[in-house]
Image: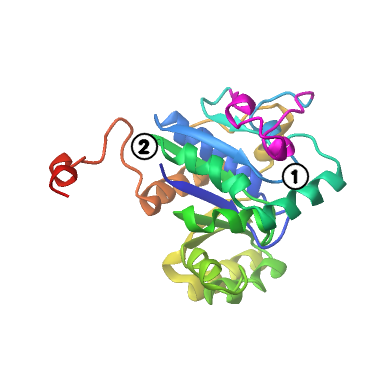
């Protein structure tokens, strides 16, 4: 039942790519995974092998009250997917406005998903703070922030270290405190990449989960409608390591095991 949000203060950092691969890795390890795409780009489905002609989705019709189960798709990696769905820019603005005033449009269905004790829910969020992410603050167990190993992302590290990147307010601060960071497209041969990694290690300490190598195989996998395969080196290996850290930080139990019910306590209470 944990909710793991993959987010970023800025766009174009590989957030959706990491979300798709985490879903595939966890599903491959035996976890029951559902992935919810809250990013209006609606690109997560392409990483997970869904046809570009498939335009239906959960978020695009969230105000129609059609229910989330009707939008659920199977994927080749074994995870279930709730795509954003095709939406015009004006519709995206309407959805954001609706969520700002009625967060339970999203929070309600997510609570239903989290009621399944064996489900791991991954959420690909839009870049930066917003109404969709804010609706999930109280339910988020772990937030994985994706940054590039470049100067633009490095400038955001102090905000993350001080829990200021989600904005003000108790809920935003509490969500920020649960955030960990992944540096994407790290190039060990590039002095700037190495310097950004060193800076992030100093500023974030244990909150830095690790780095994912810059690897042409990532782009090739998307072009081939597949995820990177197990056993591959480079970015594929790094994402397996990141998945190990996510499992540990989110407190995921091994697949098939249940938390003790302590039924007597319910009777006594």
Q: Percent from the top left, x then y, of residue 263? A: 17, 40
Q: Which residue is mark 1?
A: 40
| Picture residue at 48% right of the left edge, 34% below the top | 33
Residue 126 in magenta stretch? no
Q: Nearest the camera: 160 or 215?
A: 160
Residue 59 in magenta stretch? yes
Residue 150, numbered label: none
Q: Is residue 159 above or below residue 182?
A: below
Q: Which residue is mark 2?
A: 117
Measure the C-alpha gap from mark 1 to mark 2: 28 Å
Question: Which element is circle 2 on?
Answer: loop
Q: Nearest the camera: 232 or 248?
A: 248
Q: Percent from the top left, x then y, of residue 262? A: 17, 43
| Picture residue at 49% right of the left edge, 61% below the top | 180
Q: Is residue 45 above or below residue 15?
A: above
Is the image coloured rainbow, by chain, by secondary structure, or in one colour? rainbow
| Picture residue at 67% right of the left edge, 66% below the top | 153
190 left or right, relative to 29: right
Numbered circles on residues, count:
2
Q: Quadrant of residue 147?
A: bottom right
Q: Quadrant of residue 189?
A: bottom right
Tell me whether circle 1 and circle 2 mark residues in contact (CB < 8 Å): no
Mark 2 surroundings: few (<14), some (14-19) or many (≥20) residues within 10 A: few
Mark 1 surroundings: few (<14), some (14-19) or many (≥20) residues within 10 A: many
Mark toward the start of the polypeptide (1 vs 2): 1
Q: Nearest the camera: 30 or 39?
A: 39
Residue stretch in magenta = 53-75
Q: Percent from the top left, x then y, of residue 228? A: 58, 33
Looking at the rendered image, the disc whose residue lies closer to the viewer, 1 or 2, is 2
| Picture residue at 72% right of the left edge, 51% below the top | 98
């Amino acid at each position: 039942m944990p909710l793991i949000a993959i987010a970023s203060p800025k766009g174009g950092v590989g957030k959706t790519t990491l979300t798709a691969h985490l879903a595939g890795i966890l599903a491959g390890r035996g976890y029951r995974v559902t992935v919810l795409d809250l990013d209006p780009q609606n690109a997560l489905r392409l990483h997970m092998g869904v046809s570009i002609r498939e335009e239906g989705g959960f978020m695009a019709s969230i105000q129609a009250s059609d229910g989330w189960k009707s939008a659920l798709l199977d994927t080749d990696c074994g995870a279930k997917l709730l795509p954003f769905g095709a939406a015009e820019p004006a519709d995206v603005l309407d959805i954001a406005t609706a969520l700002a005033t009625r967060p339970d449009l999203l929070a309600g269905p997510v609570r239903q998903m989290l009621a399944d004790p064996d489900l791991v829910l991954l959420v690909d969020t839009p870049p930066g703070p917003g109404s969709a992410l804010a609706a999930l603050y109280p339910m988020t167990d772990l937030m994985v922030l994706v940054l590039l190993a470049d100067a633009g992302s490095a400038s955001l590290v102090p905000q993350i270290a001080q829990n200021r990147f989600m904005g003000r307010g108790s809920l935003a601060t509490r969500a920020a405190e649960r955030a960990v960071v992944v540096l994407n497209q790290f190039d060990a041969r590039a002095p700037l990449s190495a310097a950004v990694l060193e800076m992030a290690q100093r500023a974030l300490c244990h909150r830095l989960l690790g780095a994912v190598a810059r690897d042409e195989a990532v782009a090739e996998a998307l072009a081939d409608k597949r995820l990177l395969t197990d056993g591959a080196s480079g970015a594929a290996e790094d994402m397996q390591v990141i998945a190990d850290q996510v499992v540990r930080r989110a407190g995921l139990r091994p697949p098939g095991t249940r938390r003790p019910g302590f039924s007597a306590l319910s009777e006594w209470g």
